[in-house]
Image: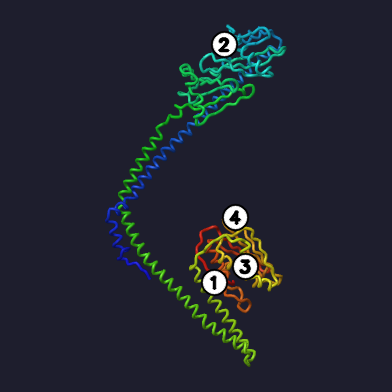
Amino acid sequence: MNLTRLDGPGGPNTVNARYETLSGLLDAYRTPVTIILFGLIVSLALFFATLIGQSQAKEREFRNHAGARIAEIDAGFAALNAELGELVNAVQTGLEPGTVIDIFDDADGSAWAPPVRDLGLLLDDRTLSSDPDASTSTLVRRTLDNHLDRSGDIDGRAVLPLPAAAQGQVRFAVIAPLDGGQDRYAYVTSDFDALVQPTELRSDPAWIIARFDRDSPVFALARNVDLRARLSASVMGVSSVLDTAPYALRWAGQPPFDTMRIDIVPRREYLLGVGPLPWLVLVFSLFATATIGALALKDARRAADISRQVDIKTAELQRSHAIIEAKNEELARFAAHASHDLQAPLRAMKGMSSLLVERQIDLDDRSQQMLKRINRGADRAQKLVQDLLSYTRADAAEVDPESIPPAALRSEIEELLGPAVEESGGTLEWRIGAPIEADRFLLTRALQNLISNAVKYRGSEPLRIEVSARTDRHGATICVSDNGMGIDPRHFGRIFDVFERLHSHDQYEGSGIGLALCKRVAELHGGRIWVESEPGIGSHFFLHLPRTEPVSAAVSNDR
């Protein structure tokens, strides 16, 4: 027996000495240092969380602003479409083209309200426009001719990009054919500076980038005219802005505006604008960390004293544990010797009574019956001693789980119990489709107990035993079913206890330990066992074996 002395190397004197050294002092201050470091990490985490929260708020603000811009652009395109429709309808009613232009030119004091910049008619041999110098109508005519040379006639309304009058500007014309000939068209012109009104915000949070998918791309940063006047499109880095934007809204129009694409992306100055809240959070977090750290340093010595007392108690517990282990070893040896010493006279008793019965000594029937009863009693006592020894050794062995193929499990059980099942006139069916993770020896003994009980407690009908299993990611549940005499539900709880029997020895042999050992097998695997039964119908014993780490083991037979 190896016991620890409290005044030895692991005793209280050693514990006290450890707290008087430099390493002991460092151990004492380990907790406050950890608290301070943790506080710094939390402070930084709160700081960045606040930054992220502000960024998400900025994204929501940007999306609301971009949604308003999209609605504004949609309304502008709808106004252009409506203006063009009215122009086409006026011409189709039979009015002279010149009269139509004059009517539209005089409708608003010769000053077109946004988004219309100009409108006109392209007829076979002439061009009519509200533009006094006719430069816009000439540009529209040239662009339309180029488009017709490339793509043919225009069946419905179409959007044509126009050369920019100013750097970075996106100009376009909306064209609609007129009845009465192939070269008769009505048009209205506009640009994005007319479509998008100036924002009321102190700082516009978004770039509005427009381009045509057809022809050469044309870019514009709408509502930033001053910047466009100073920089060329290449210096603006529009492609870079589109590629690096963390989020954006894209507008896709309905015909005829489906040839255009509009991207609304956040401005860099808007994204980098950080309020004071993250810095306030960081300052207060650092202050709280410093305060808590100071309190932790103040209590460090007290924690060291408590730790010293814990170490002393731990040493005492280790000594007690060593004593208990020694007592357990002594108890195991005693159980083995007691089993041997008890079985020796039982074997002698059984041998003598069997010898007297075999020699057929001139004894009366009562004496012969008594000898047989002595023989059966010795068998039961010897089996009881063996089962008790097996049960007491339950914690001595370790569970060694493995993947057991269904065929191997069936072969082993039928080798052990096949003759007994056949002798009873019954059948044993197997419905196990997947391997089972368990200790092979323990699972075999548990199934042996359950099937043996099914044979022993069979009813008047031909015996039918079925062994099935259901496996999933949680483990396996094995069911042993029979059509025997069944069990009253009142006894479900007690049949798994040691020495609990529902029948006398004269009715059925057994030690009352078999089901207790089945329960022990389930517990060693970290599972459980339960029964569902109805008297006169049969029983269903369920053994659940989860996928867990094994514990330890032992086994036997009988209910």
Give the residue pinned by disc 3: 413
Q: CA distance from mark 2 to mark 4?
A: 79 Å
| 93 to the left or right of 252 | right
Q: Quadrant of the N terminus?
A: bottom left
Query: Picture quarter containing residue 261?
Result: top right
Nearest the eye: 488 or 189: 189
Q: First in sequence: mark 2 or mark 3? A: 2
Q: Which mark is residue 111?
A: 2
Element type at mark 3: helix
Q: Position of residue 17 (x, y in %)?
A: 28, 59
Q: Are marks 2 and 1 in contact (CB under 8 Å)?
A: no
Q: Are marks 3 and 1 in contact (CB under 8 Å)?
A: no
| 319 to the left or right of 183 | left
Q: Position of residue 440 (x, y in %)?
A: 56, 64
Element type at mark 1: loop
Q: Amino acid at mark 2?
A: Ala
Q: CA distance from mark 3 to mark 1?
A: 24 Å
The answer to whether residue 147 is above or below residue 344 is above
